[in-house]
Image (tube, rainbow, N blue to C red):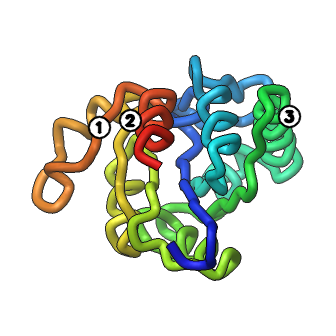
Amino acid sequence: MGRAGIRMVVLDRDGVINRDAADFVKSVDEWIPLPGSIEAIAALSKAGFTVAVASNQSGLARGLVDRRALRAMHSKLRRLVGKHGGHVDRIVVCPHGPDDGCNCRKPKPGLLQRLARHYQVSLHGVPVVGDSLRDLEAAMSVGAEPILVRTGNGRKTEGSLAGPLANIDVFDNLAAAADSLIGGA
């Protein structure tokens, strides 16, 4: 998996780690972890995984979220994971709107490619855990291993899995996905 000894997992944020909101997660108070997600991230970290988060955050482009609020949410995530003895190694976000034509908004591969460059690794076979089709498609586009969780948009997404995504691993939540990854590591 690229650089000697690095085992990476990439997580989507909203709907995988924390509750998603139709009108965007706009403040640190609205950023509420899903049950078991913080412990799951800590367990992955303690098991030797490099934990990265890759998240579309079009609320920035729409003026609904500012960078200070986003930093506060990510500080909260890191603090909570730290309380459980783990850490989040890197967080990358796409700040663009759906019509901005960027290469980083999932399902485009830019966020994942940024992580690959940062860590100097191939993403071939790296687990990418998401709740939306765009997360899974981004993973496929870089040769990573797409994993679906049923939290967030996951149940709806599960019903639309077809073609190369028809046989991917699906778990009830991040905790179950983490258990499987740690058990298979």
- Earlier in the chain: of badge 3 and badge 2, it is 3
Residue appearing at x 70%, y 54% in the figure: 60
Q: Which residue is denoted by mark 1 in the rendering?
A: 170
Work out whether mark 2 precedes mark 1 in sequence or the reverse, and give the earlier one. Answer: 2
Which residue is located at x 78 percent, y 46 percent?
70
Q: Which residue is mark 2?
A: 149
Q: Earlier in the sequence, mark 1 or mark 3?
A: 3
CA–CA distance in space, label 1 to label 3: 28 Å
- Circle 2 crowding by C-alpha within 10 Å: few under 14, some 14–19, many from 20: many
Measure the alpha-carbon separation of dots 2 and 1.
6 Å
Q: Is residue 67 above or below residue 34?
A: below
Label 1 packing within 10 angstroms: few (<14), some (14-19), many (20+): some
Camera-nearest residue between 163 and 108: 163
**What secondary structure is marked by label 2?**
strand
Q: Which disc, if any, is residue 96?
A: none
Type of residue at label 1? Val
Residues 6 and 109: in front is 6
Placement of 128 over or under 110, stated as above or below: above
* Residue type beneath disc 3: Arg
